[in-house]
Each structure stands twice: as structure tokens, then as C-alpha cells.
């Protein structure tokens, strides 16, 4: 298992350190920082966000840093630093022409880079690596401005499937992948996508934090105790951009003897759906991360009714590992990413497959199967995934005659 030690690593990406949801990039930063110094850079505040969300305490913090009223460089832990950039960038995604957008984007990148370089100097970073988590616009020119020893682009979602990123990303993301020294991806689909533009593209798997799943509270929470078995459950954001709402509606109507439990925040489509009128569907709302294992442990069968579209086609649903870490029988949508799970989950191609899979798993859940599911899921650690990232850095460094 490869390990890089004693390096300086700069991380930029889509999610700031103070994000309230789980983040691959934050987990990777924590793993990097076990043996290396890491500067985790929040995205720069843009003008429209400042205007629209100026009363948000998180935005107020960024404004104070930009005004010079407080330092933007914070020590999170030993070897791990977080940077709030001290530059305000312009909101430019509305610009219709990519060539014009790119000109302004380069100016934004320069401001962003200047802020990072101040922190780099303050920390005494030398010969650093740059790790870019899917930040195709704000960090497009950082390789040129920061001049890292090696730059890596991390693909963990098909970003150009989203309208916001598609407008300019269809041109800029392939170009960014091509000029990066290497690309790493958390799914085979995204690795193949990156390889179209950069032969140094690597599949590095997906990590998962199983702390609460190995040592957490597993007794049934109060709001699920009164729900009759069997319980068919899902944990995660309820978004029609990612989940098959009609499948859930059909499943609930066809199987009134099943209680379908959905744990997570809802978008407007879910809030207004017919699911709320069905007696065997239960919306339990958002829960703290440390409580999720208790809900999953109360399910008889877990599901991930993912809809396959340009947004989801290459993603790696971490919740499936969380289900399997508790040994739970699980039905998932059949995708390229999930094909490697076929010995541990039931792969469904349509609504009928989902119902057939649930019926099958309700009657076939012995202890040997549970043990195999747990062992498989618990092998998907951040330690293993980051070791594959280290391998990728080392392979490209060797190609270039560099010693890391």
C-alpha cells in the first residue's frame, strides 16, 4: 500500500470546509494530513452570493476576511489548515459565450491564486502537489498560477450533466482534464470519461467513514418503533434529479403490506408527490449522521432507487456501502459502478426488478450473507482509496522523472 509522506498538498474543490454535508474531499484531506501538510482552500466568495446571502454567518465570516478584519488561515488539526480566500470574485456563469466567460474566469482564477499563494508563503509550503476536486471553473488556471510539482483533477460526479456546469463545462472540463498531470476518479465510468482526454487517468475507488456504523447506536429510534415490518428503507436526500419518484409511488401502491421509510430532506417534487397520501409511506425527515446507522439497522431491506440520467450515470452512491456495512440486504439500480457490487446486492433494471428483488431478499438473509456484505463494504476505506491516489501520483511522477 503506497503512502506519500512529508509532502505539502493544496486542495481546492466544490465544497468548503464548513459545509454541513458529507464530503469526499474533506475525508481525503483528513487522510492526506496523516502524513503530509495539507492546505484545504474554501471556494472564493462571489459577488452574487455576497448580495443574496449576506446575512448568513458563514458569508459574514468570508466578508470579514476579505475586509482584513480577521485572518482567513485557520489550523484545523495537526498538519491540516483551512483557508478562507481574502478575494471577492465576480459572478460570471451567466455569460453566454465560453470564450468571453473564460477571459473573466482567468481574472477570477488570478485573484483566487493570489490568496492561496499568501497562505502558501505563510505556511512555508514547498514543492507542493495540487489536488482539484471537480472545480472546473474557479480552479481552471491554478496549475499555471500556482505552479505545483504535479496537479491532479479528481472526478467524483458527472458535473457536466448539471445545467449550471454544462454551459461552459462541456468545453472547459475536458481541457482541464487534458492539462492536468493526472486524473483520478471514484468510479470506473468517470475514469473512462477522463481517459478520453488524459491517458494518466486512474480509478481510485471510494472511501467511506464507518465510525458510526461500527461503533454507533443501533437500537430502533422512537419514530420508527411503531412502524410495522417489513420496512423497506432509504437514507439520503430525496431529490428527483437523482431518485426515481415514480418507482417509489408504484412500489408503495403495489405492495400495501410493505412500509416504505424515507429518511432525509425532500425537494419540492417529493414534498408535493402522492407518496404523502399513502399510508404505507413514512417520511422521517433529516437526521444527524450519528443516528443514520440506527435507522438503517431498523430496515428489513434497503434500497437506492437511483434514476439513471446524465447527473447520476457515473456516481458512486456511498449510502450503499453504509447499508452493506450493517449487513443489510439491498436492492440498487443497475449501473456500471454498481456492477462490481453484484455479489452483495440485488441489481435492478426497472420497477418490476425492484419489487422482485425486495421479495427475494425478504426471504433470503442468512448470517453468512450478512457477514460477506459487511466485509465487502468495510474494505472501502479512505485509507485504501487514498493509497490508490498516492499510487497514481507516484506513477506519473516516475514518468516525468520526478522523485516524490
Image: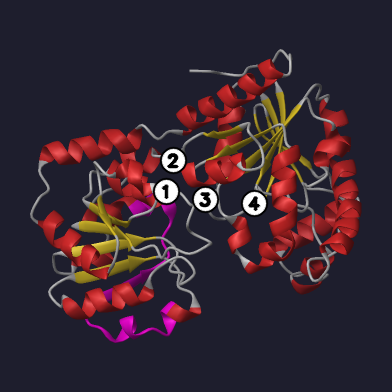
Of tags 1 and 3, the one toward the viewer is 1
Question: Residue 318, which numbered label?
Answer: 1
| Residue found at the far front of this picture | 196
Nearer to us: label 1 or label 4: 1
The residue singled out by tag 2 in the image is: 208
- Asked if one can make out residue 88 in the rendered structure from this viewpoint, the answer is no
Please give the range of residues in magenta: 270-292
As for residue 166 lying within the magenta part, the answer is no
**Rendering coords of residue 350 (x, y %):** 29, 66
Label 1 crowding class (10 Å Cα cut-off): few <14, some 14-19, many 20+?
Answer: some
- Residue 317, given in percent of the width and then of the height, sits at 42, 51
Q: Residue visible at 12% across and 48% down?
A: 365
Are the residues tagged 2 and 3 within 8 Å (C-beta)?
Answer: no
Crowding at dot 4, Cα within 10 Å, few <14 / some 14-19 / many 20+, comes out as many
Q: Residues within 10 Å of mark 3 (few under 14, many from 20)?
A: few
Q: Which mark is residue 15?
A: 4
From mark 2 to mark 4, how far is it between C-alphas?
Answer: 17 Å
Question: Is residue 157 rendered to the left or right of residue 216?
Answer: right
Q: Earlier in the sequence, mark 2 or mark 4?
A: 4
- Whichever of callouts 1 and 3 sits on the residue coming sooner in the sequence is 3
With respect to residue 305, does 291 lie above or below?
above
Query: Given contact means CB atoms under 8 Å apart, are the residues at marks 3 and 4 in contact?
Result: no
**Residue name at image x 77 percent, y 67 percent:** 49
Disc ID at residue 22: 3
Residue closer to the observer: 219 or 21: 21
Amino acid at each position: 500500500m503506497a503512502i506519500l509522506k512529508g509532502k505539502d498538498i493544496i486542495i481546492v474543490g466544490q465544497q468548503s470546509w464548513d459545509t454541513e454535508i458529507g464530503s469526499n474531499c474533506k475525508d481525503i484531506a483528513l487522510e492526506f494530513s496523516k502524513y503530509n501538510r495539507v492546505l484545504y482552500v474554501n471556494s472564493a466568495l462571489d459577488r452574487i452570493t455576497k448580495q443574496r446571502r449576506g446575512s448568513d454567518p458563514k458569508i459574514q465570516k468570508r466578508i470579514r476576511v476579505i475586509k482584513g478584519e480577521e485572518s482567513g488561515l485557520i489550523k484545523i488539526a495537526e498538519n491540516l489548515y483551512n483557508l478562507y480566500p481574502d478575494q471577492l470574485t465576480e459572478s460570471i456563469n451567466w455569460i453566454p459565450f465560453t470564450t468571453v466567460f473564460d477571459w473573466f474566469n482567468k481574472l477570477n482564477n488570478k485573484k483566487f491564486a493570489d490568496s492561496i499563494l499568501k497562505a502558501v508563503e505563510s505556511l512555508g509550503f514547498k514543492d507542493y502537489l495540487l489536488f482539484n476536486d471537480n472545480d472546473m471553473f474557479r480552479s481552471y488556471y491554478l496549475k499555471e498560477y500556482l505552479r505545483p510539482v504535479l496537479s491532479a483533477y479528481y472526478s467524483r460526479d458527472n458535473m457536466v450533466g448539471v445545467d449550471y456546469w454544462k454551459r461552459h463545462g462541456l468545453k472547459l472540463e475536458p481541457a482541464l482534464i487534458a492539462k492536468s498531470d493526472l486524473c483520478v476518479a471514484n468510479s470506473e465510468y468517470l475514469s473512462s470519461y477522463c481517459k478520453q482526454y488524459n491517458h494518466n487517468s486512474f480509478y481510485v475507488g471510494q472511501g467511506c467513514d464507518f465510525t458510526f456504523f461500527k461503533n454507533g447506536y443501533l437500537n430502533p429510534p422512537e419514530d420508527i418503533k411503531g412502524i410495522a415490518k417489513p420496512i423497506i428503507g432509504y437514507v439520503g436526500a430525496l431529490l428527483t434529479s437523482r431518485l426515481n419518484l415514480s418507482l417509489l409511488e408504484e412500489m408503495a401502491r403495489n405492495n400495501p403490506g410493505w412500509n416504505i421509510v424515507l429518511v432525509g430532506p425532500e425537494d419540492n417534487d417529493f414534498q408535493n408527490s402522492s407518496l404523502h397520501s399513502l399510508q404505507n409511506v413514512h417520511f422521517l425527515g433529516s437526521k444527524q449522521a450519528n443516528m443514520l446507522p440506527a435507522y438503517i439497522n431498523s430496515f428489513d431491506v434497503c434500497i437506492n432507487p437511483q434514476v439513471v440520467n446524465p447527473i447520476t450515470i457515473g456516481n458512486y452512491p456511498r449510502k450503499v456501502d453504509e447499508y452493506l456495512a450493517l449487513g443489510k440486504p439491498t436492492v440498487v439500480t443497475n449501473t456500471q459502478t454498481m456492477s462490481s457490487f453484484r455479489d452483495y446486492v440485488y441489481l435492478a433494471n426497472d420497477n418490476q426488478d425492484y419489487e422482485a428483488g425486495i421479495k427475494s431478499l425478504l426471504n433470503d438473509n442468512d448470517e453468512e450473507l450478512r457477514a460477506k456484505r459487511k466485509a465487502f463494504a468495510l474494505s472501502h476505506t479512505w485509507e485504501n482509496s487514498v493509497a490508490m491516489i498516492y499510487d497514481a501520483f507516484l506513477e506519473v511522477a516516475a514518468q516525468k522523472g520526478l522523485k516524490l
